[in-house]
Image (cartoon, rainbow, N blue to C red):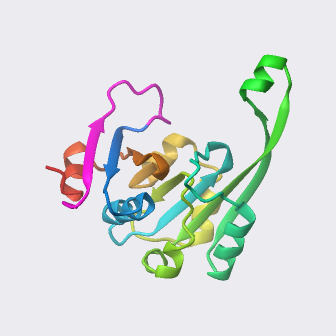
Amino acid sequence: MVDYKLKLTKITNRNDINSPQYSLIYSHKRRPQLKIGYEIISLLKENNDIILEIDTSLIVQTKSSNKFNYEDFISDIKKMNLQYSYKKSQAQRHDLLSTLFGFKRNEDVHIITVYVPDNVWKDEAFKKIIPDCGIRYYIMKGSDEARKVLDDMNMMTDREKNNYFLYVIYDASDFYQMGISSNYYGYDDIKRILEIS
């Protein structure tokens, strides 16, 4: 990873289980941020399967990123015969105008969770459909039956997810930053895997 600029920081003032243990800031002058994020996650996941979770309420996009369309993404993963789960709910929107004028606006929230076997992760066709809007990644310990894992995840608490998966990573690629949590790998392990000196 010597051609990337990486800075790993241990977060010492974590509020709760949802806060990451580590912050990773990355950059490269000639490579798109999504490609760098993909390569970092590939190093951390090694040959294990991975689960992607896109929650539209957590999407962070800049003007330069592609607008995420959940229907197009679901269509793409169906074409690849990937197992996934989809949930739709309503959430109250908290923007400046709603707060100032006391409006209560609801918006649809879409959560798409996709099980991605290691061989699909490494496929160029899959790399092209990875959104650049902020994704939570769950790295498996090896592989398992996709439908069972997705169904089990719906019943897991955040603490149980942290125990079940090797890593839980949130990649905000538009901001060149990842939040990383792991009950199995510490600060020095992650630095070694990513070759950070």
Quadrant showing the N terminus: bottom left
Instruction: Estimate the x, y position of residue 32 in percent, counting from the top left.
Output: 41, 62
Q: Quadrant of residue 112?
A: bottom right
Q: Is residue 50 magenta?
A: no
Left or right, residue 127 beside residue 1: right
Which residues fall within the magenta stretch? Answer: 1-19
127 and 61: which is toward the camera: 61
The answer to which of 151 and 58 lies nearer the viewer is 58
Residue 29 percent coordinates (x, y):
31, 57
Q: Is residue 57 above or below residue 147?
A: above
Residue 13 is a magenta residue: yes
Tell me which secondary structure the magenta stretch mostly adopts: loop
- Please indicate whether residue 88 sits to the left or right of residue 66 in the image: right
Q: Count the marks: how many?
A: 0
Q: Is residue 181 above or below residue 2?
A: above
The reply, left or right, for residue 17 in relation to residue 81 is left
Which residue occupies the foreground of this view, 160 or 94?
94
Can you name the residue that lies furthest to the left here? 197
Q: Position of residue 26 (x, y in %)?
A: 33, 50
Comparing 165 with 27, the one in front is 27
- Quadrant of residue 54 within the rendered picture: bottom right
Residue 72, position in %: x, y? Answer: 71, 69
Q: Residue at x 34, y 60 (%)?
A: 40
Q: Residue at x 65, y 57 (%)?
A: 67
